[in-house]
Amino acid sequence: MKVIYINTFCRNQKEVSSVINEVIDQYWEKKINEKEMIKMIETVVANNESLVIKNKSFTTTVKQVCGKRRLEIVARIINL
């Protein structure tokens, strides 16, 4: 397994969406394991909560960029 480097503090919703996509895609390609994916998603969402979640739901930009399947995974990880 190779180590992937991601920004855990993002500038905007588009960037945080791209990071979420990258982490989940790496998991689907079996480049990182489930534990690593969960830890990374938890960190990214915790550090960028205002960019990812508004009114207990994902922001519109995050929904559009990440798509339904990835957000189902994120929701399960962060118990949304």
Image (spheres, helix red, strand yellow):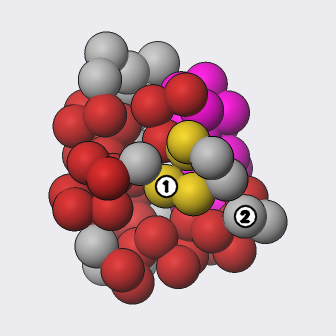
Q: Amino acid at mark 1?
A: Phe
From mark 2 to mark 1, how far is it between C-alphas?
Answer: 9 Å
- The residue beneath circle 2 is 80
Seen from the viewer's position, the closer of residues 80 and 46 is 80
Label 1 Cα crowd, 10 Å radius (few <14 / some 14-19 / many 20+):
some
Residue 44 is inside the magenta segment: yes
The reply to whether residue 33 is in sight is no
Q: Which mark is residue 42?
A: none
Determine contact: label 2, label 1, CB under 8 Å.
yes
What residue lies at 56% left-to-right and 42% top-to-bottom? 54
Image coordinates for residue 58, horizontal then vertical, percent:
49, 55
In terms of secondary structure, what is the magenta stretch mainly?
helix
Residue identifier under label 1:
58
Answer with the quarter of the image where residue 7 lies.
top left
The quarter of the displayed image where residue 11 is located: top left
Residue at 55 percent across and 28 percent down: it is: 50
Question: The residue tagged with tag 2: helix, strand or loop?
Answer: loop
Q: Position of residue 56 (x, y in %)?
A: 67, 53
Say which element carries label 1: strand
Q: Which residue is painted at 41% across and 48% down in the image?
A: 59
Neighbours of disc 2 within 10 Å: few (<14), some (14-19), many (20+): few
Which residue occupies the foreground of this view, 56 or 32?
Answer: 56
Residue 44 lies, with reference to residue 33, above or below; the image says above
Residue 61 spot, x, y in % from top left? 26, 48
* Residue extent of the magenta highlight: 35-49
Regarding residue 24, the answer to whether it shows in the image is: yes
- The image quadrant of residue 13 is top left
Residue that protrudes farthest toward the right in the picture: 79
**Residue, x 39% and y 84% (percent of image)?**
69
Q: Which amino acid type corresponds to the residue marked 2 in the rendered image?
A: Leu
